[in-house]
Amino acid sequence: MQLYFLIVAGHLLPLSLKDGLGYIQREAYQNPDFAAVNLQGPGTYGNPVRVNDLPEVKLHTNFHCTLDEVWDLSSTISDDTIIATLHGQVKAKDVRTLKPGNQINDVVINYIGPFLMSQKKDVYVASTFWLNHCSQELGLKEMLRCDFHKYEKFVFPVHCPGHWWCVLIDRPMKLYGEFDSLCKDRRSDYVFQVLCREFKTANIDISSFRRLSQEEREKLPSQGQNVFDCGVFVLGFISAFVNNLEMNFSLRDMPFLRNSFAK
């Protein structure tokens, strides 16, 4: 079995292949000057290898592998392997939540949000933690750091125990919508009042915006009895909204959407 060794204060610590790769990835991300050395050359306990004579192998934080390799739990890619850093830090364990049969985590949503904002300059996607800050002294606006007049469309993901839904606001169309693949009658007065208060600080009165009609709610894609895909539906709602597309995806599209978002 292949092993990695970590030298700490003169002590040689053996690491498994999986743990060794995980350590190297973490160290490479945190320390840009980090380099690994290949110790497969000749050397024994009595005649040790001179590390300084060995070639350095510079490691890059941009990790390259196939999606199947990440999703394969038996692979050598550890959960803590850093997969991407462009729009936030995403690890293998986060990407693995996009594998069918898993509920996606907040890291995935918080990565895709900034990605969409980089593509659509008139769109603002809030962090999944925005609602947690609404009662703090600094206020929600300080957490959002958002110039409400700069954007035309706003996305606010909402997480309640075991479930994801979202609020989508279209300022030019004067539309306020709650999109939930499990509860089509979703109507949170609390979330509505919080957002009304914050938008009012920018002299934008979203309380006068049109709400989704019952007919529109009935047409929303539904996850049915599925308990894993609510977050994928939310990403579907958000993607369709920011790209001005019809929300005509369904439960049968979930494997394709999971694969697309993972890539």
Image (spheres, helix red, strand yellow):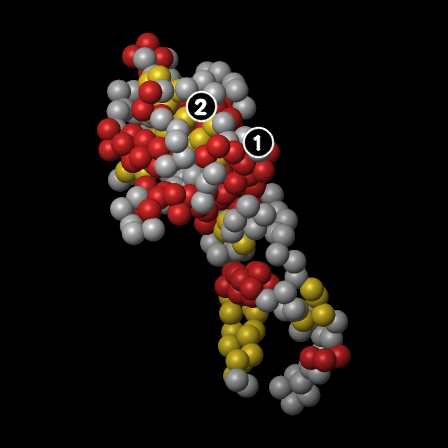
Kindly identify which numbered label has been placed on residue 128: none
Does residue 106 show up? no
Q: Which residue is mark 1?
A: 120
Please provide percent x and percent y for residue 128: 39, 41
The secondary element bearing badge 2 is classed as strand
Please provide percent x and percent y for residue 240: 49, 23
Within the image, what quadrant is residue 205 found in?
top left
Q: Residue at x 57, y 31 (%)?
A: 120
Q: Residue type at mark 1: give it.
A: Lys
Q: Residue at x 47, y 38 (%)?
A: 147
Alpha carbon distance from label 2 to label 1: 14 Å
Please provide percent x and percent y for residue 35: 66, 69
Count of marks placed on residues: 2
Vertical side of 138 occupied by 115: above or below: above
The secondary element bearing badge 1 is classed as loop
Mark 2 vs 1, N-terminal side: 1
Q: Residue furthest left?
A: 189
Q: Which residue is mark 2?
A: 170
Q: Residue at x 55, y 86 (%)?
A: 10
Observer-nearest residue: 39 or 131?
A: 131
Within the image, what quadrant is residue 57 found in?
bottom right
Q: Residue at x 56, y 73 (%)?
A: 5
Q: Residue type at mark 2: give it.
A: Asp
Q: Quadrant of the N terminus?
A: bottom right
Local crowd size for mark 1, using a 10 Å CA cut-off: few (<14), some (14–19), many (≥20)? some
Vertical side of 232 occupied by 220: above or below: above
Please provide percent x and percent y for residue 39: 67, 73
Kindly check if marks 2 and 1 are in contact, taking CB atoms under 8 A apart as contact.
Answer: no
Q: Residue furthest bottom?
A: 46
Q: Which tag is nearer the camera, tag 2 or tag 1?
A: 2
Local crowd size for mark 2, using a 10 Å CA cut-off: few (<14), some (14–19), many (≥20)? many
